[in-house]
Image (cartoon, grey):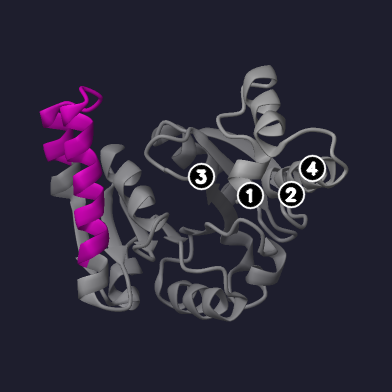
Amino acid sequence: MKVVVIGAGTMGHGIAQVSAMAGYTTVQVDATLLQASAGVERALGNLDDGVKRGKVTEAARDAAAALLSASDDIASAVADAVIVIEAVPERIDLKHSILATADAHMPSHSILGSNTSSLSITDLQDTVTHPARVVGLHFFNPVHINPLIEVVRGRRTDDATMTGALAYVERIGKEAVVVNDSPGFATSRLGVLLGLEAMRMLEEGVAQAADIDRALELGYRHPMGPLKLTD
């Protein structure tokens, strides 16, 4: 089975990496072959680092590397894909264009995912012929380490798409939280709230920035305090 990841940046190369590690034939696509190849190289670098740290076996690295390739042609790459995931910058016009192109050339039964962290999945569905197969797949950075994926159901996402998306999440070894389409979904919405309240506390002189962050890191086991994260 084939996964296509469109966008070879910070998130895209990680999504391609975990897909290949799960045994999917994986194509990394970007505007130029040079950019797409750079994404593959970053994924391979992560795998090599995993071997050095004892987290990835050499056999697993080699198997994943053999499944990774690069392309600058969306239409041909997605023609036989079971899952296509866009991970391009958070510009609604760019995502509309990418999703429309992928939708026009991929099999009608395949899943079309968006890695957006804040844009409406329902709005993204407006630009495609098959809106029922569009779903949010919000990965977290670094993708190869963070276990969470928000699976976001748009207004027209159907049950078959949700089932397939959740099966993909399970196969790549991640944990899913299912969220209905809403501004900021669950994680971004809660994160903004926490960050704003921390800023208000700093403004009011409740505590110093380092102590506010340390309170969340120690008391609630956040890996990074809200002010440090916002900064």
Asked which quadrant contains residue 144, the reply is: top left
How far, Cα to Cα, is label 2 from label 4? Answer: 15 Å
Residue 61 relative to residue 81: left or right: left
How far, Cα to Cα, is label 1 from label 3? Answer: 15 Å
Asked which quadrant contains residue 142, the reply is: top left
Asked if labels 1 and 2 touch by Cβ distance under 8 angstroms, the answer is no
Asked which quadrant contains residue 102, the reply is: bottom left
How far, Cα to Cα, is label 2 from label 1? Answer: 9 Å
How far, Cα to Cα, is label 2 from label 3? Answer: 16 Å
Sequence order check: which comes first, mark 4 or mark 1? 4
Instruction: Tell me: residue 52, above or below residue 98.
Output: above
Residue indicated by mark 2: 192
Residue 96 relative to residue 15: left or right: right
How far, Cα to Cα, is label 4 from label 1? Answer: 13 Å
Instruction: Tell me: residue 218, above or below residue 125.
Output: above
Residue indicated by mark 1: 230
Q: Position of residue 92 (x, y in %)?
A: 61, 75
Asked if labels 3 and 4 touch by Cβ distance under 8 angstroms, the answer is no
Sequence order check: which comes first, mark 1 or mark 3? 3
Sequence order check: which comes first, mark 2 or mark 1? 2
Residue indicated by mark 4: 202
Q: Tally the marks.
A: 4
Which amino acid type corresponds to the residue marked 3 in the rendered image? Phe
Callout 3: SS: loop
In this picture, which residue range is highlighted in magenta?
Answer: 37-63
For mark 2, does the 10 Å Cα neighbourhood hold few (<14), some (14 to 19), or many (20 or more) residues?
some
Q: Position of residue 190 (x, y in %)?
A: 75, 43
Q: Main secondary structure of the magenta part?
A: helix
Q: Position of residue 119 (x, y in %)?
A: 66, 64
Asked if residue 159 is among those painted magenta in the image, a careful observer would answer no
Residue indicated by mark 3: 140
Which amino acid type corresponds to the residue marked 4 in the rendered image? Leu
